[in-house]
Image (cartoon, rainbow, N blue to C red):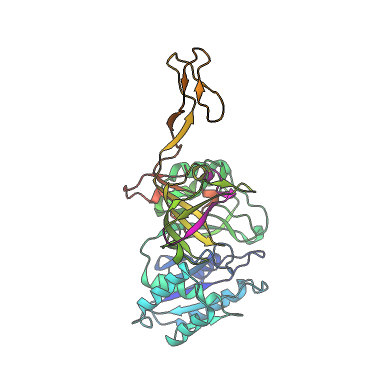
Amino acid sequence: MIIGFDDTDSKTMGMCTTYLGALMLKEIPLPPDEITPYLLRLNPNVRFKTRGNAAVSLKLAPREDYTDDLWKICCELLEEFAVFDDENTNPGIVFLSEEEAAGMHRELERFSLRAVRDFITIDETKDFLKRHKIKHRGYKNGRGLIGALAAAGFALNGLSDWTYELVAYRKPENWGRRRSLNEETVWAADRASYPFTWDTVDHQNKKIVFSPHGPDPVLFGIRGSDQKRIMDAFRIIRSEPIDRYLIYTTNQGTDMHITEARIDDAREGRSYKIRGRVTAPPRTIHGGHVIFTIEDGSGEVDCAAYEPTKNFREVVRRLAPGDTVTVYGALKNRTINLEKIQIERLIPRRVLRNPLCGCGKRMKSVGKNQGYRCKRCGTRSDLPEIVEVDPGIRVGVYETPPVARRHLAKPLIRCNEGKVKTYPSR
């Protein structure tokens, strides 16, 4: 059996859908090791998302049929903890058994993937649930049913690529207060577990990035590829008292939201991998954002390294017209918001300078279009010296730093196929 639920939190009033998953896991009358929790990040460009746009599902194998009891437990917990006072919070919950799902695995798999890469309406979700007689309940306008069904679908069909996140929760009496973490132990935990954990800290920007700042119950989240290393890091960290923690299997850090496309085929609010040629020198605009344009024969599109990407902008600034790149990121307002960039080919960088005289002294310009003359010996030259200079970047893949990284973006330490040189942000 799979239980999926979503849209229980609020941007301003707190709560967290993953926290509800931890509460349900405790209340379901099964040993915790017989329940697999999934944390699914959906399309990060959805307008109605609350923070990271996470949906949750729990996969379990009850020893007997107590669907009604489970349904009562889960709905009561959702109704108690969801932030119904926020007009943008519209929870949904679904119950799905493998027997009920027989024959619709492929359709449900497609639905789940679309929820990560595209947009799905409430009406088509309700139609899917009705056609397949899936037990569900939507509250208010029922938008949470989209994520609930998508999360259930991934738990049913499995993930082609996955990582883990240990989410530690605060005691309720501390919600809304400033979080208390021993920063030295956070850095020590990172040193002890990297590269099997990531995005705990940002070395270049000297920031701890694994702990949120809002009124939600989350104290911190440790992301990684190895559950043992995650637990090792967790044991090192000293903090305010922890209420509970849970390790989720997740699609974070997988690039599941990215699809390959030509420029003219790209649509707003989706995330793409697009190969093209730089057409103009990068320019820095107000706010410190760096913009450049690429074309691929089907069209042109601007690409942006925004100010929050910090040192990543220095890579982008060194691009030149004629360079061949592949960009990764979401298309918003006809601009690709960069998450990664692969530099495939760099054209030679050449500069002109005054020619060197045979006597060893560098000549001076006589005047516009009048050539050059050596002040020491009087030797003249009509042509400048052409010098090839270091572009300051190399062919390979570069990424935004942890302070600006999206949940779904695949960190370069996971891109170890060896075919292309990678330059992780640390």
Up-down: is 7 above or below 123?
Answer: above
Q: Is residue 59 above or below residue 397?
A: below
Residue at (57, 52) in percent of width and height: 211
Rendered residue at 36%/44% (across/down): 421
Residue at 43% across / 47% down in the picture? 322
Q: Residue at x 58, y 44 (%)?
A: 182
Name above or below for residue 27 compared with residue 311.
below
* 305 magenta-colored: yes
Can residue 61 be seen at all in this image of the molecule? no
Question: Where is residue 37 shown, x and y percent of the image?
Answer: 45, 66
Picture coordinates of residue 317, whole percent (x, y): 52, 43
Q: Position of residue 347 (x, y in %)?
A: 40, 42
Closer to the camera in the image, 294 or 404: 294
Q: Is residue 175 left or right of residue 100?
A: right
Left or right relative to 10: residue 128: left
* Residue 14 pos. (x, y %): 64, 64
**310 and 262: which one is in front?**
262
Which region shows up in magenta?
297-313
Can residue 307 be found in the magenta stretch?
yes
Q: Nearer the viewer, residue 402 or 298?
A: 298
The residue most toward the front is 370
Q: Quadrant of the N terminus?
A: bottom left
